[in-house]
Image (spheres, rainbow, N blue to C red):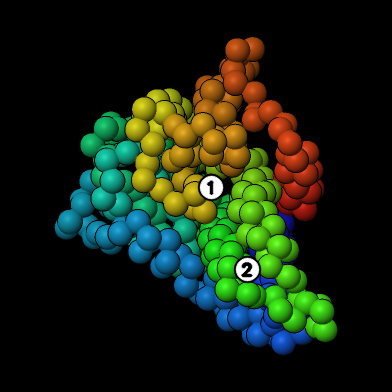
Amino acid sequence: MGNQFKTAVLLAALTAFIIMIGGMMGGRQGMIIAFILAGGMNFFSYWYSDRLVLRMYRAQEVNASQAPELYGMVTRLSRNAGLPMPRVYVIPQDTPNAFATGRNPEHAVVAVTEGLMKLMDPGEIEGVLAHELGHIKNRDILIGTIAATMAGAIMMLASMARWAAIFGGGRGDDDEGGMGGLGLIVMSLLAPVAAMIIQMAISRSREYLADATGAAIAGRPDGLADALEKLGAYSQRRPMQANPSTAHMFIVNPLSGRSFQSLFSTHPPIEERVSRLRGAPASPSSPPPPPSRGGSGSVDSGKAFWDRMSGR
């Protein structure tokens, strides 16, 4: 029930945010139009956001004849996990990474990059696949996909607010509560920060839980631990060509090689994840979570809020 409740809250937050922007740009009439738009976006997020993410990365579905080794691993691990067989996709990028998406286990997708298949040995690939199946088993994938859609929508609204300010938007502020040009510019600057906070509000504990679930599905933690070490090293040297709004969906942060995005990472430190998998305490030298900077106190409280909702 935890993730179902969080999904409902995310959808409600998206609706409220869009209505607020509509009011700022067009007063009462803008709020009505925004409410209709929000309803359509909520419907789209639930039913089609997974397809949007796959199309964003030009992922191609493969079958048993096209990728027998990969498909066989997913089939075997799905059976171990007691899950329906998900669809399998390959992303044409050289940086190793992977994610799962879909609204429920019956409509799930596992996607891996070409780089993962080339650079990892079979045990490590199985560990990564088991981690993604862990997200499916724990029903994390819907909230992750909807959060990606929300973050993208917020970025789009920020752009709309900028153009509205430039071309005289918000003229109804005096009589209908609309916001003037200056307010729209401020909103366009704050909206991307709100998108990052939404991503960070999705608890990092879901990654730890997926690691533990994945280790159980694979039957051993070493493959995933070794894979995480390699993935962390590659992501530092060769960040993936990824949309920031979807960064939280991947097994490791695809943007971790970029200092600004790493301050807002939705993933726990790889060293800590590996230590937990190997059963060893974290090294005192392990990097701590991103430090508080500026308004990040609200980010920390946001993460704690989601943790409490999920009962963790």
Judging depth in this view, the residue of 18 and 105 nearest the camera is 18
**Relative image position of residue 150 (x, y in whole percent):** 59, 63
Judging depth in this view, the residue of 82 and 12 nearest the camera is 12
Residue visible at 82% across and 84% down in the picture: 175
Q: Secondary structure at mark 2?
A: helix
Residue visible at 57% across and 29% down in the picture: 269
Residue visible at 46% across and 39% down in the picture: 255
Amino acid type at circle 2 is Ala
Residue that numbered label 1 is attached to: 248
Tag 1: Cα neighbours inside 10 Å, few (<14), some, or many (≥20)?
many
Tell me the tag on residue 165.
2
Residue visible at 42% across and 66% down in the picture: 52
Residue 11 relative to residue 160: left or right: right
Note whether 205 is above or below 66 in the view shown.
Answer: above
Judging depth in this view, the residue of 291 and 270 nearest the camera is 291
Q: Secondary structure at mark 1?
A: helix
**Relative image position of residue 31 (x, y in whole percent):** 72, 81
Residue 144 relative to residue 78: left or right: right
